[in-house]
Amino acid sequence: MTLIKHKKLSRDDWQYLKEGGELRASNNIVNLDYWRGNNAVLVSEHSPCGILIHGDENPESFVADLDKLSLIAIDMPSFADGRAYSLAKVLRDTYGFTKEIRAMGDILPDQALYLTRVGFDALEFANETSATLAIEKLSDFSVFYQPQLSSQA
Amino acid sequence: MYLYNEIDQTLLNERVAQFRDQTKRFLSGDLTEDQFRPLRLMNGLYIQTHAPMLRVNIPYGLLSSKQLRMFAHIADKYDKNYGHFTTRQNIQYNWPKLEQVPDILADLATVQMHAIQSSGNCIRNITCDPLAGVCADEIEDPRPYCEIIRQWATLHPEFSYLPRKFKFAVSGSPKDRAATQVHDIGLNMKKDAQGNIGFEVLVGGGLGRTPVIGQVIASFISEKDILSYSEAILRTYNLFGRRDNKYKARIKILVRETGLEKFKAQVETEWQTIKGGSLKLTAEAIQRVKTHFSPLHYQAAPRDNDHAKHLANDSSFKAWVKQNTVEHKHSAYKVVFVSLKSPTRPPGDMTDRQMHDLADLSDDYSFGQLRTTHDQNLALTDVLESDLYALWQGLKRAGLATPNIGTITDMICCPGLDFCSLANASSIDIAHEITNRFADKAVDTGDISLKMSGCMNGCGHHSIGEIGVLGVDKKGEQWYQLTLGGSDSHYSKLGERLGKAIAKDSVVDAIDDIVDVYKENRTRGERFSHTLQRIGLQPFKDKVYDAH
Ligand code: SF4
C-alpha cells in the first residue's frame, strides 16, 4: 500500500486490525463491529483510534462517536460506486469532522482530485506507480465551478 | 449567447488535456477497458456497433453559427460528413476514431463546445425550451439559470459516480416545450405572489424501460436556493439510490420505492443543513451570469414588406410558412423551424454542407444564432418577417425546407439497429418508409407526433408519442409494438398499447390504418389524441388487426 497525503507520498502511521490480530499500542484502524464492542478500552488505552467503514454505511450508525475518532477509513467497493463521496462530504460539512478521512479499496488515480475535493485527505493506492500518477492527477484542474468545502476554505 | 470568461475556457482546456492523457494511457495498456469505460463515458464516448460514437453537448440547445461551422468541420475531417442531432440537445458523430477524439475535443474547445458529461452516470446536459427568450408566454428566460446549473454540475466532484445518469430540463413558460415531466429533475419557472423568481421542482420523471411522469416535490423554490435544493436531491439520490441493478438505479425508482413524501422529507432535512451555505446564490451572482448573455438588438418592421405578396403568389412558400414558422414575442419577427426530417436523410441527420449553408443563413437572417429542439430539428428563432422569403429560398437550396414540422413525417427516431448495439429492431428504415408513404399527405393529415425507439430503453421517446413505435425481438426477428395516445406537452401522458406486436413488413401499413381511422373520425381541426380520447382504442384495434 502506498499512501498520499497533502499531495505527497506519505508514511503510514496506522495499521488495520486483522481478524484475530493483535492490537497495537495506538493507531489501530478497527471495523465498526469491533469498535462498538471495544471502544471504551480503545479510547482509554490505545488512542488515537480509527475505524474502517464501508462506502454504503449510514453515518447515523457512528456519528455519535466522532469526537473519539482520529481517523475514518472508507472502503470503496468499486471505483464506479460514488456513495462514499457523499459520505465524506457529509462527515466534513454536516458533522464537522476535521480529522483524517481516508479512501481505500478500489480507487483510480484519476479519481484522486474529486476525492480530495469532497473531503478525503488521505488516499491509499495499491502501489507507488499508481500513487505517483495520482499525485500528478491532483493538478489536472486549476479552476473549479463548485465552492470549496467549508472546512478547506 | 453565453460568452465564456477565462475560467470557463481554462476549465475546458484542462479537461481536453486530461482526456488526452486518459486516452493515451488506455491505448498504451495502462488503463484497462473497465477502468477507461467510465472515464470515456463521462466524456461522451461510447463504443457502438461499428465504431465509437461521440456525443457533444449543445448546452440548453443554444448554438452560434461559428459553432455550427465547427460541427461541419468535425463531420468533414473526422467523420463521414454528417452529424446526428438528438432529442436532448446534443449532436452525435457515429464514425470517429478513438485516437482522434482528443483532437476533436481540442477543436471543439476553441469554440467553447465540449462533450463533458454527455454520457455516463453523472449529471448530463441541461436541456431547455428551444423558444426560450422569444416566446410570448414566457415567465422568465430560463437560459441564465440553465447556465448556472450547468456550471454547478460540471465536473461536480461528488456527483460524478452516481447510481445512474441524471438529467435536468428547465422551462420558462407555462407551456412546456422542454419535457420537464420526463426528466430526473424538471424545473418550471414561476413567480410567487410578490413577483420573486423561483421554480416548481419535479422529480423522478423519465422514459426508458419504466416510463414515469415526474411528481412535484416542491411547489416553489426561490432562484437563490436552486443549487442547494438540487444538491440536496442529488445527495439523497447518491446515498440511497440502488446500485444493485442498473435497471432500478434511476431516481424514479428510488422515489417510487421510498415514497414521495418520505423522499421529500429526506431531501428537506439535507437541504436545511446546506441551504444557507456557499451554494446560496446572491442577486449579484445571478445578474453576473445574465449579463454574460449578449442581448439581441431587434428592429422595427421595415416599411417595404413584400411578405404578403410572396404569400399570395407562391403556394409552396405559403405552405412552409404555415407549417414551419411560429409567432415571436416581437411582431416583426418569426421563429423558423428547420426540418431535419427530409425524405433523403435519416431523422435528425445533417450533412457538413448543410451545416455550412445553415450557418451562413443564420448569419444573414437570425443574428448568427440557432437552437436545437427536442424533436431533433433546428430553429432560427429571430427572423424578420420580411426576410422569410429569402431565407426560405436559401433553406430550399440547402434541402432544409421540408414543410413538415409537427406532422407525422417529423418523427423522432433513435439510431436503432443500424448503429446501436442494444437495439432489437431497426428504426431508420421504418422512418424512411413512413416518410415516403406520407410525403404527399402529411400536411393534410395534420399534426401527429410519431416517436420510435429500437428497444425498451426508449431513446426515441416512443412512450410519449401520439403514435409510439417500439422495436421488439421475437425469436431473432424484428417486430414492432405500437402505442397510441402518449403526449409530451404540459400534461405528459404515456401511450396505451394497441395490441400484440406487428411484423416488420406490416408496420407502416398499420400506421397508415391508424391515420385513416383518425381521418375518418376526426371533427374539424381535432387533434389525433382528442379523437382517440373520444372514440377510444377499439376502432383503431379493429382496423389494424382485422386487416393483418
Ligand atoms: S432506444 Fe434502444 S436501440 Fe434506440 S438508441 Fe436507445 S438503446 Fe439504442
Image (cartoon, grey):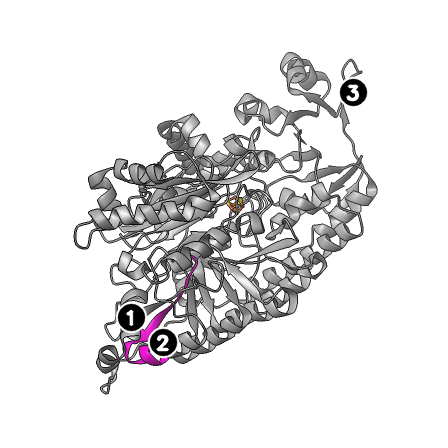
B289 with respect to B53 (left or right): left
The answer to which of B303 and B77 lies nearer the viewer is: B77
Q: What amino acid is at disc 1?
A: Val
Circle 1 or circle 3, nearest the eye: 1
Residue receiving disc 2: B392
The answer to which of A51 and B118 lies nearer the viewer is: B118
Residue B510, quarter of picture? top left
Compared to residue B445, the image places residue A49 above or below, namely above
- At x 34%, y 51%, the residue is B449
Q: Residue furthest front?
A: B547
The reply to whether callout 2 and callout 1 are in contact (CB within 8 Å) is: yes
The span shown in magenta is: B374-391
Residue B407, quarter of picture? bottom left
- Please state the horizontal and vertical placement of residue B542, each as a whole percent of the image: 29, 37
Residue B188 can be seen, yes or no = yes
Q: What amino acid is at disc 3?
A: Ala
Circle 3: element type: loop
Compared to residue B133, the image places residue B318 above or below, namely below
B130 with respect to B235 (left or right): left
| Residue count near mark 2 (Cα–Cα under 10 Å), binned few <14, some 14–19, many ≥20 | many
Q: Are marks 2 and 1 on the same chain?
A: yes
Q: Which mark is residue B321?
A: 1
Query: Which quadrant is the N terminus of chain B positioned in?
Result: bottom left
Q: How many marks?
A: 3
The reply to whether callout 2 and callout 3 are in contact (CB within 8 Å) is: no
Task: Please say whether residue A134 is one of the residues in the magenta stretch.
Answer: no
The reply to whether callout 1 and callout 3 are in contact (CB within 8 Å) is: no
- Please state the horizontal and vertical placement of residue B472, each as a whole percent of the image: 50, 38
Circle 1: element type: helix
- Please state the horizontal and vertical placement of residue B489, each as a whole percent of the image: 31, 49
Instruction: Name the N-terminal-most of marks 2 and 1.
Output: 1
